[in-house]
Image: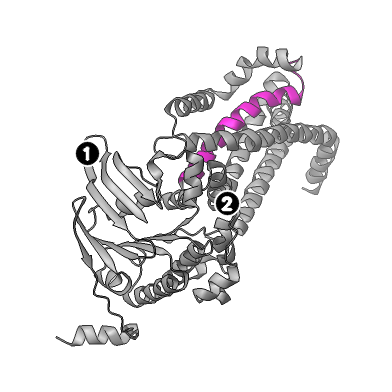
Amino acid sequence: MTESISLYIERVIEFSPRLIESLWETGIMLFFAMIAAILLGIPVGTLLYLTADTRPMANRFLNRLLNILVNIIRSFPFLLLVVAMQPFIRQVYGRATGDPIAASFPMVVIAIALYARFVEQSLMEVPRGITETAQSMGATNWQLVWKFLYVEARSSLVIGFTTAVISFVSYSTIMGVVGGGGIGDFAIRYGYQRYETDIMYTAIVLIIILVEIFQWLGLKLAKRIDKR
Amino acid sequence: MIKLQHIEKTFYSKQTEFTALSNINLSIESGESFGVIGESGAGKSTLLRMINALESPDKGSVSVDDVNLTQLSKKKLRLQQKQIGMIFQQFNLLNNKTVADNVRLPLTLHKYPNALTVDEVLDFVGLADKKNNYPQELSGGQKQRVGIARALITRPKLLLCDEPTSALDQNTTEEIVEVLKKAHEEFKMTIVVVTHELLVIKALCQRAALMEQGQIRQIVQVNRCESKEIVVPYLERAIEVLTHD
């Protein structure tokens, strides 16, 4: 028993440089996806909310357009999105395979679409009376969004972000197909293709721990900022 | 002075249409305390919301101090709205902000040269000690006081009250009415109160419009009960109502 444990530890140590490298690659992909979700997903989601019928910036054309775009991206099987974006990535970035930054492009696209939906839903939960109050005070749409809607929706926005990031982890495991690397790719290469089952399970456990940490942090923060 | 002339308003939903206001003509003097009363669906809230342009009429015109709200650009309209305070049935406080931050909120949207301070208004409504609490920690009556403080901090020339006491029990209602009365005496603004509670109008208003099915049926002079009723504690009142004929 102790022998097999020490054997296992030895193997983990042996694989640890590659394990750490793949965690780093996952980190790069998640980083770009998170930045995109915040910088673009939030504005797109807010526009989805504001441009719907009876809302302050009601605009049927823009609302339809955004809805269709978000739906198309989200209904794409992710693997096909990755493949379909290859020519575009090659144009913009020079290469489409073999590094985590190239692999981040499809991650960014799905991150924006996914989080935009969460943002829209969070804003829908804010009581209508809040918007009315802002308007009765003569607030601009910008003030309505920043001083009223985001304030009341903030913990829901954080919980949505947490859920989105956990999906990003899952999406990132596919990126091995285009040589993007990452912890998921590591698990597939060693576990599935080389039958190093113990190493595969180690990688999977690491992914689970990663998800647990995100979930825990997200909920903790959401609770702390929720005074409702 | 508030002037509504020949107002028509119809709401359309998928199959039905609903006439909310029809041929409304009304003028309310500056400094007056005016009530609008009627059953639910009579159109009183829609009428109130015309006065600060939360709703716009299909036909007719709304003017406040000779400014026709129906013809203003969005920017100019906001400058009008900033001078009008409003309180709501559901209080509409931001639950993620403290009492003080809620009250201060209007001052962060526009410049108000003559604004009161947060401490002054909280003192006025009797909530100085709740400054750093969150709305969740307050009772309904206290929440409405915060709503009133938030409306008063800008020293509005006009205060609109949309069912201000309808979410409150009777004793709390009397407290809120007293606060509004005191505000009217102190700041001398015009007050328009919409409610289905007759006693609120009776205690607070000089004139009242009676509404039914989107029309004003009559405007009456209110015989105010000036003698301040002493607020009877809830349990005493309950015993009185339940055990007497």
Asked if badges 1 and 2 are on one and the same chain, I answer yes
Label 2 crowd bin: few (<14), some (14–19), many (20+), radius 10 Å: some
Residue type pointed to by label 1: Glu
Q: Is residue B11 above or below residue B33?
A: above
In front: label 1 or label 2: 2
Q: Residue furthest front?
A: B66
The percent coordinates of residue B156 (x first, y second) are 48, 60
Which disc, if any, is residue B109? 2
Q: Quadrant of residue B70?
A: top left
- Which residues are drawn in magenta? A95-124
Q: Main secondary structure of the magenta part?
A: helix
- Measure the C-alpha gap from mark 1 to mark 2: 36 Å
Q: Residue at x 55, y 61 (%)?
A: B102
- Read off the residue under disc 1: B17
Give A16 or A139, whichever is nearer the viewer. A139
Q: Is residue B239 above or below residue A165?
A: below
Mark 1, secondary structure of its residue = strand
Left or right of B106 in this view: A208: right
Q: Residue at x 34, y 86 (%)?
A: B230
Residue A66 visible at all: yes
Q: Is residue B153 above or below residue A55?
A: below
Label 1 crowd bin: few (<14), some (14–19), many (20+), radius 10 Å: few
Disc with the residue nearer the chain's start (1 vs 2)? 1
Q: Chain of mark 1?
A: B
